[in-house]
Image (tube, helix red, strand yellow):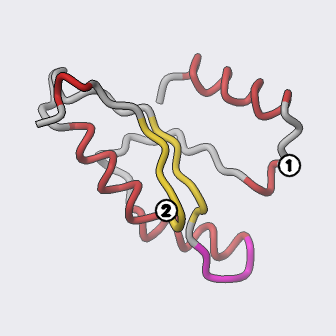
Amino acid sequence: IDEDCINLLKENLKYFDFDEKFYKIIKEDIFEMDTQNFLKEIENTLGSEIKCDFVISNPPFGIQSIKNADTFFLKKAMEIAEDGIFTMHKASTIE
């Protein structure tokens, strides 16, 4: 939900000339996101049932104010990703 990060992502997508129909940027509080509605929205847009090929996320690390928040991000990503999840985590919080 960080506007600066979203703007940087948009610049990078333009730089690599990605067609907007091939990606969706979600600016939403992950703790309130309804993944089923998200998938229905994608289905309505494309006219067929589909999951995302990949989910890229940079979750808050589990050592911040919400313990294990990164785990919640992974669970949400698994609900909508078809082939893979790209995410970053701190090695110190592996347990």
- Residue lying furthest top: 4
Q: Image quarter for residue 71? A: top left
Q: Nearer the viewer, residue 95 or 32?
A: 95
Give the quadrant of residue 94: top left
Q: Amino acid at mark 2?
A: Ala
Residue at image location 52% in from the left, 39% down from the top: 27
Q: Is residue 48 magenta?
A: yes
User: Cα distance, mark 1 to mark 2?
Assistant: 19 Å
Q: Residue 63 appears in which quarter of the rendering?
A: top left
Give neighbour class at mark 2: few <14, some 14-19, many 20+ (Cα, 10 Å).
Answer: some
Residue under the point 67% across and 75% down:
44
Residue underneath mark 1: 19
Numbered-mark total: 2
Magenta-tinted stretch: 46-50
- Identify the residue position indicated by label 2 in the image: 81
Above or below for 25 versus 91: below
Amino acid found under the numbered disc labelled 1:
Asp
